[in-house]
Amino acid sequence: MAVESNIVSYAQVAGDARTAADSGDRIESIKLSLVYLPLATPVSDAKVLTGRQKPLTEIAFIFAEIRSRDGHEGIGFGYSKRAGGPGMYAHAQELAEHLLGEDPNDTSRLFTKLLWAGASMGRSGLTTQAIAPFDIALWDMKAKRAGLPLAKLLGAQRDSVQCYNTSGGYLHTPLDQVLKNVEISRNSGIGGIKLKVGQPDLAIDIQRVGEVRKLLGNDFPLMVDANQQWDRQKATRACRAFEGFDLTWIEEPLDAYDFEGHAQLASRFDTAIATGEMLTSFGEHAQLIMAEGSDFIQPDAPRVGGITPFLQIMALGEFKGRKLAPHFAMEIHLHLAAAYAIEPWLEHFEWLGPMFNEQLQLKNGRMWVPDRPGLGFSLSEQALAWTADHKTFGKGA
């Protein structure tokens, strides 16, 4: 009888207990905004010199601002260069209502829900990129709810990340100005310099890299980026020519989906190979990593669908011993890189600065994780002025 009595009391306790599903918060409203960031000077890389793309003059951003029933808020963004911004914005509007009434803490489940909502269009490319603003906003909310910077919520490995600058070394920039830009970046506390390469004449690339290496000295980290514009033969010649410059890496020497070709270069040369920024899903990055296609992986959270798939890429990258150098969007990637087990690099772009009220701190070659909860940024008045359209879903719509 004593045993039966205990069983009854346990059942009563279980029956009275609330579950996580009972007590969870709910998404109440979502605001989507399409914002165009103008660039002061049109930007050209190797894709422009080959005639495949026009110079970059503006960047389209899709911002998602999510508010929950319990008063928690999160903000995230995706972006597109040259084309695709209106398409992303349109698909994001189709997805938004799928989140209303959901528990914002269920980031993995909600990512999967949104992925399948647009699966007839595929599970990479525009469909995943349109998910990113929501997924990133939900992670921002989750960290704010905990009162922690996102890096700390994820379990930071470090409080700062070594940081390199790209924006001063584009192909449209004359060499004398490149050298001035390099000096400015180094004096500002940057930890590395990346130059664009891919001139029709390889000798010009070699000259430009040589002059920058001479200015920086042998010990300062220097990278180059060909933006996918070489074939295998030209890439082999270029990698061989650059071996003497002690580069930290050679980026995108081949088409982004030529995993086999990148793997051959990575095994053949001492200089590290970096690629991955153009891939738009965990599955594509898994193919790259498992093919031994690079020494550095370069995922982009807004392009792969947000922080949820980015964390999957990090886990596989760590397991396979890959180094990490996320592409663009340092406001997001600083937190993710800070949580990576192997010492990573962060790409510095000052372009996005005017859109946010808060700025990141650069010191002694490293970018420091801010102490603000979440991702630690909010939209500025300038961003609001650049807003081309916005829509609200749920409460207040």
Image (tube, helix red, strand yellow):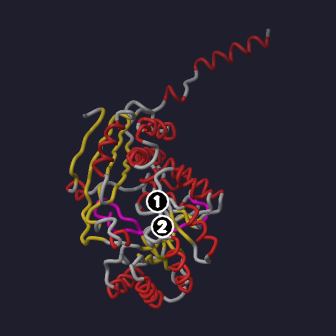
Quarter of the rendering occupied by the C terminus: top left
Q: Is residue 176 left or right of residue 4?
A: left
Q: Residue at x 51, y 57 (%)?
A: 336
**What x and y, as percent, mark residue 387?**
22, 52
* Figure check: 388 above or below 365: above
* Figure check: 21 above or below 274: above
Asked whether 232 or 338 is in front, the reply is 232
Q: Residues within 10 Å of mark 2 (few under 14, many from 20)?
A: many
The residue tagged 2 is: 346
Q: Earlier in the sequence, mark 1 or mark 2?
A: 1
Q: Amino acid at mark 1?
A: His
Asked whether 104 or 72 is in front, the reply is 104
Question: Is 354 colored magenta in this rendering?
Answer: yes
Residue 15: which quarter of the image? top right
The residue tagged 1 is: 333
Question: Which segment is the magenta one?
Answer: 340-361
Q: Residue at x 52, y 82 (%)?
A: 242
**What x and y, as percent, mark residue 119?**
44, 38
Question: Is 390 colored magenta in this rendering?
Answer: no
**What x and y, as percent, mark residue 22?**
50, 25
Quarter of the rendering occupied by the N terminus: top right
What is the magenta segment's predominant secondary structure?
Answer: loop
Residue 366: image tag: none
Task: Kindly check if marks 1 and 2 are in contact, taking CB atoms under 8 A apart as contact.
Answer: yes
Q: Is residue 69 visible?
A: no
What SS does tag 2 mark?
strand
